[in-house]
Image (tube, helix red, strand yellow):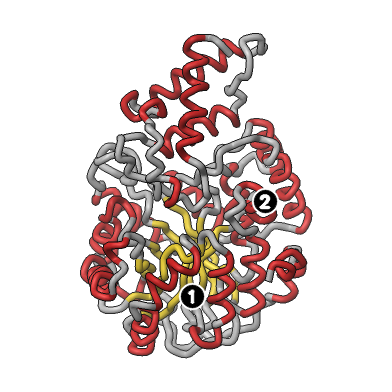
Amino acid sequence: MKNKRDRKTISRRNFLKVAGAAGAAMAGLTSCGKRNAASSATTSEPAAGEGAMTLRTSPSTGDRVSLLGFGMMRLPSVGGRSAREGNDAIDQEMVNALVDYALAHGVNYFDTSPAYCQGLSERATGIALSRHPRDSYFIATKLSNFAPSTWSREASMAMYRNSFRELQVDHIDYLLLHGIGMGGMEAFETRYIRNGMLDFLLEERRAGRIRNLGFSYHGDVRVFDHLLAHHDRYKWDFVQIQLNYLDWKYAKQINSRNTDAEYLYGELSSRGIPAIIMEPLLGGRLSNVPQNVAAQLKQREPEESVASWAFRFAGSFPGVLTVLSGMTRMEHLQDNLRTFSPLKPLTDEEFAFLQQTATMMMQFDTIPCNDCKYCMPCPYGLDIPAILLHYNKCLNEGNVTVSVRDENYRRARRAYLVGYDRSVPKLRQANHCIGCNQCSPHCPQGIDIPKEMQRIDRYVEQLKQETL
């Protein structure tokens, strides 16, 4: 398979040719677009009316899905931050308002998990969505049986059953095996095969309690290849992959454990399997790009946000069913709605421009943290993602200095130290890392977290002592 992957570099133009959409009959649709009859191919179409959300049609169920999907992993907290951070409770009123606004503007795909927002995302999602007609939205959730305590059939079954209760539904529209590839084939076999859970989920799909069955992929590509090799048996309705203009060709260079999105999308496209896109902004890195990169993007589209380029990239591939965005604030939702209502697909020239932009960004030695928080909680209280993201932010803004003789040393030193204390409470900073390494095995990006904590702590001390 390795030679096959190395050979398989396909341009967007070729994808447009091989994944060109056939027409699909729209009879029997409800207000959400659900129907039982399968259509022949994934199709793209705008919703009725100018400025309406672009929709994509699932080939297996005929679902008309909004191209923008609402990721419920960064729900707002009462403290104003994402509920993935700290111990603040989810702000249910704000979640309700975001869901109401999203539905009113054409978003109908909501993605959650038992693992999100400290285990409370499904409940908050269920409360918000249950206030609306069941046929006006699609719910996606996951069997997130990462922990050894959830590997048994009984524990995995309990997690699955609990999702129905928390979401207040009698069927799940899109159910994912969560984090396939993390831990390799052994973890996959343990979590889904030996305990009979995959066979059970296939039965649940036949019974209609699961309408679409798929998996999200991180890590070992051999597991991805294995599941696609058995597509005739499993008949995956969709697969969730990480895709953005940096990971298109550089994912493996950023982290050897990752797989270039060009390969992942190509394998799905060749089999007619719709792709759900996660990390279109690469954990926020593509909305907070280096200043010279941001200037180039704004020069081309002065009225559009930097983030909109990344969303347009992900949405321009015809085999993509929806692009997930974790939206904590209303302005995030409104900006994303402008991008997808309707989507303006990239031209070939714009696609080439973003590939040049990715090459430029690879010159910056950023840490590939996607703020997924799988490394959390740290037993010693560190806010690992905040530490790494502050470093990346300062690096992108030119505020990581290498010598007291640098022309901008004073400005960079102040920006880093003041921003560090504002972004990360002192008791949660890198100097408290003892190197226990309970975090690194859970990182989908393969970051050696203790090593980075030591490096950043050393850099901070050198700034404080002015010994660079």
How packed is label 2: few (under 14 Cα within 10 Å), some, or many (20 or more)? Answer: many
Q: Of helix, strand and loop, which one carries label 2?
A: helix
Where is the N terminus found, in terms of image quarters?
bottom right
Measured along the vertical axis of the image, is residue 318 above or below residue 80?
below
Write the residue at 48% across / 75% down. Answer: 64
Q: Which residue is mark 2?
A: 250
Measured along the vertical axis of the image, is residue 98 above or below residue 459?
below
Q: In the picture provided, is 67 more to the left or to the right than 84?
A: right
Marks 2/1 in contact by CB < 8 Å: the verdict is: no
* Number of marks in the rendered image: 2
Write the residue at 59% across / 27% down. Answer: 397
Q: Of helix, strand and loop, which one carries label 1?
A: strand
Residue 156: image location, x then y, percent: 29, 71
Q: Quadrant of residue 364?
A: top right
Q: Is residue 322 visible?
A: no
Measured along the vertical axis of the image, is residue 463 above or below residue 384?
above
Q: In the picture provided, is 396 more to the left or to the right than 136?
A: right
Write the residue at 24% across / 50% down. Answer: 93
Residue 300: image location, x then y, percent: 71, 42
Q: Mark 2 or 1 closer to N-term?
A: 1
Write the residue at 59% across / 80% down. Answer: 229
Measured along the vertical axis of the image, is residue 95 above or below residue 424?
below
Q: Quadrant of residue 228?
A: bottom right
Residue type at numbered disc 1: Arg
Residue 414: image location, x then y, percent: 50, 14
Residue 447: image location, x then y, percent: 51, 44
Q: Is residue 73 visible?
A: yes
Residue type at numbered disc 2: Tyr
Label drawn at residue 64: 1
Q: Nearer the viewer, residue 10 or 179?
A: 179
Where is the C terminus found, in terms of image quarters?
top right
Distance from the alpha carbon under mark 2 to that under mark 1:
32 Å
